[in-house]
Image (tube, helix red, strand yellow):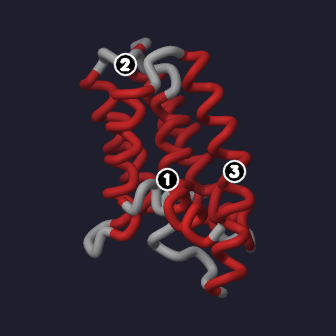
Amino acid sequence: MIFFSSLFNTFFFSGNSPIAPGTAGSFSALLFWWLFLPSYEVRLVFLILFIFISCFTISFDLQLNNIKDPQYIVIDEVIGLWIALFFIPSNDFINMILAFIIFRLLDILKPSIINRVQNIKGVSGVLLDDIVCGFITSMLLIGMINI
């Protein structure tokens, strides 16, 4: 369980990057999304599956290491970015990159509600700030695309 949890929470060890692990994990998520998740149905299945599994693996990791929100856990960034990317077609590289940039800025700066949600204890706090970042990024992109 320790190996699987580590593999999953670090998104294939991208979260072990010594420099900007959240950005490394998000970039890995972007590549995975583009290469392997072309249809909305497959995207939805992966997103739901990853949210479900991450509730257990993050909880396991938090209890094992007794750290509030370790930087190496990037599965939350993966899920958040995938939410941001959900409605963007796989061949729309410009908006995919724009989603990545907006998501990372929101995740780093944590304005308003994102900061409040991050302060929730446990798995919920680890996951929800990135999920909120993903939804805000998605709404911003949909708004910009439809202008």
Q: Is residue 141 visible?
A: yes
Mark 2–mark 3 Cα distance, whole angstroms, equals 25 Å
Between residue 145 and residue 9, name the one nearer to us: 9
Q: Is residue 116 visible?
A: no
The percent coordinates of residue 87 (x first, y second) are 50, 20
Q: Residue at x 46, y 73 (%)?
A: 71
Question: In the displayed structure, does residue 14 sit left or right of residue 142?
Answer: left
Label 1 crowding class (10 Å Cα cut-off): few <14, some 14-19, many 20+?
many
Question: In the displayed structure, does residue 115 sit left or right of residue 138?
Answer: right
Mark 3–mark 1 Cα distance, whole angstroms, equals 14 Å
Q: Which residue is mark 1?
A: 77
Which element carries disc 1, helix, strand or loop? Answer: helix
Label 3 crowding class (10 Å Cα cut-off): few <14, some 14-19, many 20+?
some
Q: Which of the marked residues, 1 or 2, is nearer the chain's N terminus?
A: 1
Q: Residue at x 34, y 28 (%)?
A: 35
Q: Which residue is mark 3?
A: 53
Between residue 64 and residue 120, name the one nearer to us: 64
| Residue 107 sits above or below residue 62 on the image | above
Q: Which of the marked residues, 2 or 3, is nearer the chain's N terminus?
A: 3
Name the residue type under label 3.
Ile
Image quadrant in which the N terminus is located: bottom right
Q: Residue at x 54, y 61 (%)?
A: 9
Question: In the displayed structure, does residue 137 sit left or right of residue 120?
Answer: left
Q: Which of the marked residues, 3 or 1, is nearer the chain's N terminus?
A: 3
Q: Residue at x 40, y 15 (%)?
A: 89
User: Residue 64's image quarter?
Assistant: bottom right
Mark number displayed over residue 134: none
Label 2 crowding class (10 Å Cα cut-off): few <14, some 14-19, many 20+?
some
Mark 1–mark 2 Cα distance, whole angstroms, equals 19 Å
Q: Which residue is mark 2?
A: 90
